[in-house]
């Protein structure tokens, strides 16, 4: 395997680079300044030069609330940028891995969402990511779409670091308790991405998060269990956000489990992150 990573400066892109370095898989990685995915000629030039055997498309517009206002930028990055990379991969017969989101679902079902359930996004970010999925499906035969949720990890900005930072300045935090989902450690996601390619799993759509479900409130309680701050629950209706969120976006992981990848529980993943931070 020789990998090419887009979105090299994001939290997943950085984690994937770290993991590939550990397992000694050669790769090249590009941020927007080195390979702007909105520049199709640049994309084609870089991929032609590097000759990867797989492309991991981690680049994305992920500012969920801002996407309600920056609809054009959200769409151009998540749809047209994806199209440029996917078309180049098609022309060069390179397998393509696209990272999508639980936000393609409306969260109104009390059941877990299976990979073939009907999407119905309720915010602009989810709509653009779903459109990106369709571009991948219509352009390529050799692709993996991986829907994930509530991503956290060692790098970049995410819920874990936000909670830890807020806890330093406040005595009390109120966190939404009626939105239910699955946290996803970037390490788990990175391992699974490589697992799909290395074990030559069937092309198509997969769901990957850590095992177990929780609310944002429960997640925050786990993050701040050793901090001197009170964490109190609040309902979504009392904490208005620009972008509507799915209330129950629990992804069904059964298809991913069948590939033979052992998915750790989110509490174990969080424990590993917190322990690493404490040892720094």
Image (tube, grey):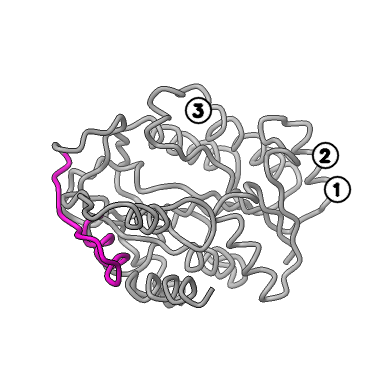
Q: Which residues are magenta?
A: 216-236
Question: Earlier along the polypeptide chain: callout 1 or callout 3?
Answer: 1
The answer to whether the residues at label 1 and label 2 have Cβ atoms under 8 Å apart is: yes
Q: Which residue is mark 1?
A: 49
Front residue of 90/188: it is 188
The answer to whether the residues at label 3 and label 2 have Cβ atoms under 8 Å apart is: no
- Label 2 sits on a secondary structure element that is helix
Residue at 16% x, 55% y is 232
Q: Which residue is mark 3?
A: 75
Residue at 16% x, 50% y is 178
Residue 120 appears left or right of 11: left
Residue at 20% x, 58% y is 231
Q: Which residue is mark 2?
A: 45
For disc 2, the neighbor class at 10 Å (few under 14, some 14 to 19, many from 20) is few
Position in image of residue 211 (x %, y %): 32, 69
Say whether residue 227 is magenta.
yes
Residue at 14% x, 37% y is 238
Q: CA distance from mark 1 to mark 3?
A: 28 Å
């Amino acid at each position: 395997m020789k990998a090419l990573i887009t979105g090299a400066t994001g939290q997943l892109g950085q984690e994937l680079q770290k993991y590939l370095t550990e397992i000694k898989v050669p790769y090249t990685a590009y941020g927007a300044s080195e390979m702007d995915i909105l520049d199709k000629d640049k994309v084609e030039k870089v991929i032609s030069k590097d000759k990867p055997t797989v492309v991991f498309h981690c680049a994305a517009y992920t500012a969920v609330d801002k996407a309600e206002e920056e609809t054009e930028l959200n769409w151009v990055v998540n749809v047209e940028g994806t199209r440029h990379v996917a078309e180049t991969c098609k022309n060069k017969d390179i397998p393509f891995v696209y990272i999508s989101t639980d936000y393609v679902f409306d969260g109104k079902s009390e059941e877990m969402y299976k990979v073939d359930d009907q999407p119905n996004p309720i915010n602009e970010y989810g709509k653009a990511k779903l459109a990106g999925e369709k571009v991948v499906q219509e352009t390529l035969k050799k692709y993996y779409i991986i829907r994930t949720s509530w991503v956290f990890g060692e790098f970049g900005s995410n819920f874990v670091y936000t909670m830890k930072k807020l806890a330093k300045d406040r005595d009390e935090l109120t966190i939404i308790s009626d939105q239910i989902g699955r946290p996803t450690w970037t390490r788990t996601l990175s391992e699974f991405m490589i697992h799909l390619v290395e074990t030559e799993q069937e092309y198509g759509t997969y769901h990957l998060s850590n095992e177990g479900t929780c609310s944002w409130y429960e997640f925050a309680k786990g993050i701040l269990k050793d901090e001197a701050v009170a964490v109190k629950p609040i309902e979504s209706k009392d904490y208005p956000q620009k972008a509507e969120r799915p209330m129950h976006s629990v992804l069904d992981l059964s298809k991913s489990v069948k590939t033979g990848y052992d998915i750790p529980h989110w509490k174990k993943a969080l424990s590993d992150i917190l322990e690493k931070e404490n040892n720094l």
